Image (cartoon, rainbow, N blue to C red):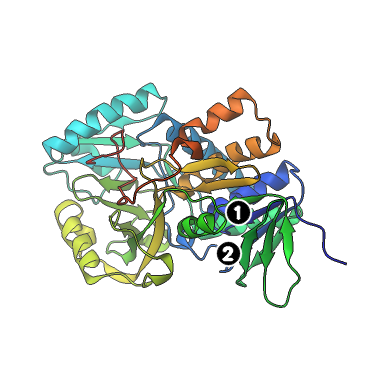
Amino acid sequence: MSRRPVDLLVLGAGVLGAALAYHLAQRSVGSVAVYDPRPAGAGASGRAAGIVSLQLWSRWDVDVVRASADAYARRAGRDPTIGFRRNGFVRIASSPDSEAALAPAYERWTEWGVRCRRVAPADLGSVAPSVRPDGVRLAIYSPDDAVVTPSALVDSYLAEAERLGVELLVGRPGEIARSAERFELVRSGEEPRRARAVAVAAGAWSKRLLATLGAPLPLAPYRTQAALLSPRPPVPEATASIHDLDQDVYARPEAAGRLLAGDGTDRVECDPDGVAPGSDPEFLAHLARSFGERCPPWASAELVRSWAGVCTATPDRRPIVGEVVPGLYVLTGFNGFGVMRADGAAARLVDVIAANGRPSSSEEAALAPVAPGRFPPSFPPFAPKPGFTVEPGDVARF
């Protein structure tokens, strides 16, 4: 006898798919399974920085990340392994242009209820002791911003989802297909698994999956790089994460006095299966030069390891979340910042899924800025754009 179809099959076992599966199970939205041909968290989630900041460029982002941060804080109370802590975040502008971008962003953040304040250059040492204040024109500090360990967050979501009855189908490749009435997952040596609905939350592989399912969307996978460093003296865990707008370098404290650092977006689309896992020498040299100018104690830090990952861009830098066609949902295109948005975005999508085709006006409004239908059926190729910016609009300098 063939197995009964699941009500919803989540494609992707990274932080977005894991958060979605958890919320679906918690809301009792039918039977749920999660499929990923790779181990859970093996994509971008396992290589992410895990910064959770409200210093963002759109009100939708701020609301969603605030909800995510609160959810992570609650989860940390029952699962401290996720490493969530509110260490704060400081953004630094050293040129007239970056100052001109950061100053109005600060006004928007305060208007949106983000708790943040200006920090005089001479006082930067109180939140980020290694930052050299010379040449800093403006610095904005958010004390409630946080960090989390993305791989542990994935494990936590999936473990709880599994306890709630979600079936995990991870670590073995298969093929997904769509017919007129259902979706089907075929894996070697197993009978096909049928699903009444599918949610694509597969990060950089979402573009390919959506095309296979006959519902292409404008997505562009792109390469990112990061490194784990061991500075001397060690970095206190209470140190604020930083983002230098002019260097486009970010850094956050890690356990054991270490530092995780990265440098933004590679603005060329890539094949997610063809990206080498290691970093480039030029990337490490850029980190050293940038730290030499702004954080001298970190410039000579020992390299523990470095890596590359693949994130997913959209033409307007906003994610794509919602129903594409009946029975096919999407949660992708987070421009490298899926971890900080995962819980809030997944919860909003589950509100729509649970409505079974009849979402309320407020549920529709909650996803309107990121709805798939904002794009025309045919969209030209585009270059990835930076996602961790302070300026609104489709094109941002900082």
Q: Name the residue under label 2.
A: 40
CA distance separating discs 2 and 1 = 9 Å
In this view of the protein, which residue sits in the foreground, 293 or 278? 278
Image quarter (top left, top right, bottom left or bottom right) of the C terminus: top left
Looking at this rendering, what residue extends furthest in the top direction?
Answer: 111
| Disc 2, SS | loop
Q: Is residue 371 visible?
A: no
Q: How many marks?
A: 2
Q: Quadrant of residue 1?
A: bottom right
- Residue 171 in percent (x, y) is at 61, 71
Asked if residue 304 is positioned above or below residue 181 in the image, the reply reads below
How packed mark 2 is, by other alpha carbons closer than 10 Å (few <14, some 14-19, many 20 or more), is many
Q: Which residue is drawn at 82% across and 63% down?
A: 3
* Contact between labelled residues 1 and 2, with CB atoms less than 8 Å apart: yes
Q: Of label 2 and label 1, which has the lower sequence position?
A: 1
Q: Is residue 20 left or right of residue 89?
A: right
Q: Residue at x 24, y 36 (%)?
A: 139
Q: Can residue 163 be seen in this view?
A: yes
Amino acid type at circle 2 is Ala
| Disc 1, SS | helix
Amino acid type at circle 1 is Ala
In this view of the protein, which residue sits in the foreground, 313 or 278? 313
Q: Mark 1 points at which residue?
A: 18
Looking at this rendering, what residue extends furthest in the bottom direction?
Answer: 189
Asked if residue 305 is positioned above or below residue 209 in the image, the reply reads below
Q: Quadrant of residue 104?
A: top left
